[in-house]
Image: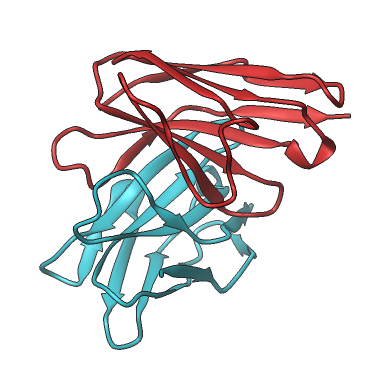
Amino acid sequence: SAVISQKPSRDICQRGTSLTIQCQVDSQVTMMFWYRQQPGQSLTLIATANQGSEATYESGFVIDKFPISRPNLTFSTLTVSNMSPEDSSIYLCSVEDGTGGEKLFFGSGTQLSVL
Amino acid sequence: AQSVTQLDSQVPVFEEAPVELRCNYSSSVSVYLFWYVQYPNQGLQLLLKYLSGSTLVKGINGFEAEFNKSQTSFHLRKPSVHISDTAEYFCAVRPLGFQGGKLIFGQGTELSVKP
C-alpha cells in the first residue's frame, strides 16, 4: 500500500489569496489524482496529474483556478487560486494501488476555510 | 454516465446492533464497486470492493457487501457494530475499462454508534 503525506492539514485563508497543497507519496506512481470534498457532499475528481505532462482536468475545473504541478513520480502540488468562500472544502490527494488500478489510496486531506 | 446514491445521510445505531448502509448506482456500462470509510480527520480507507465473481464480498473490520445487479445495489452490512465504527462511509463506482482514477462517489452516510 502507498503512504501519502499531505500538507497543510488545514488552513484558514482570506478571500482573493492562493494556497498551495503538497502531496508526497512514499513510492513512485504514474498518476496522482486530486479530489475535492465540499461540505456535506461527495468527493469530486478535480484533475489527474501525470509526471511530465499537463494535468487533465474534469468538467467544471480549469487550470487557471487549480494549477497543478507534478515534478517527479512521488510529488504533486495543487494550488487553489484567487480563493472565495465557495472554495472552502477538503482537498484530497490520491494514487492508484499499482497492482491493478482498481482501488485508490488517499491522503488525509487538507481542510480549507476561506473567509 | 454514472451516478451513485446513498439512501441515508445519517444512520444512528446502538453498539452491538446490526447495521445496513444502502447504496444504489446507475451506469450504462459495467462497473467496479467500492466502499470506503473515512474516520474523523483522516483520509479515505478501502473497506471492500467488488470486481467480479461471488456477489457477497467480505471486507475489513467485519463488514460485508452484496452486489445485486438486477437492483443495481451494493449495500454494506455488519452484524454487530462497535463504537469504533463511527465514521463516514462512501460508496463508489468505477466504469470497467476506464483508465485512470475517476471514482464516482455517493454523498456519504454518517454512521453513529452509540453505547
Q: Residue furthest bottom?
A: B70
The answer to which of B75 and B107 lies nearer the viewer is B107
Q: Position of residue A16 (x, y in %)?
A: 84, 24
Which color has been applied to chain A in this rendered view? red
Q: Is residue A111 left or right of residue A98?
A: right
Quadrant assignment, res B65: bottom left
Q: Position of residue A47 (x, y in %)?
A: 46, 38
The quadrant in which the C terminus of chain A is found is top right
Decide: is B7 above or below A10.
below
The quadrant in which the N terminus of chain A is found is top left
Chain coloured cyan in the rendered structure? B
Viewer can see residue B63: yes
Name the residue rendered at 64%, 35% in the picture: A90
Viewer can see residue A25: no
Q: Position of residue A6 (x, y in %)?
A: 51, 18
The answer to which of A79 and B104 lies nearer the viewer is A79
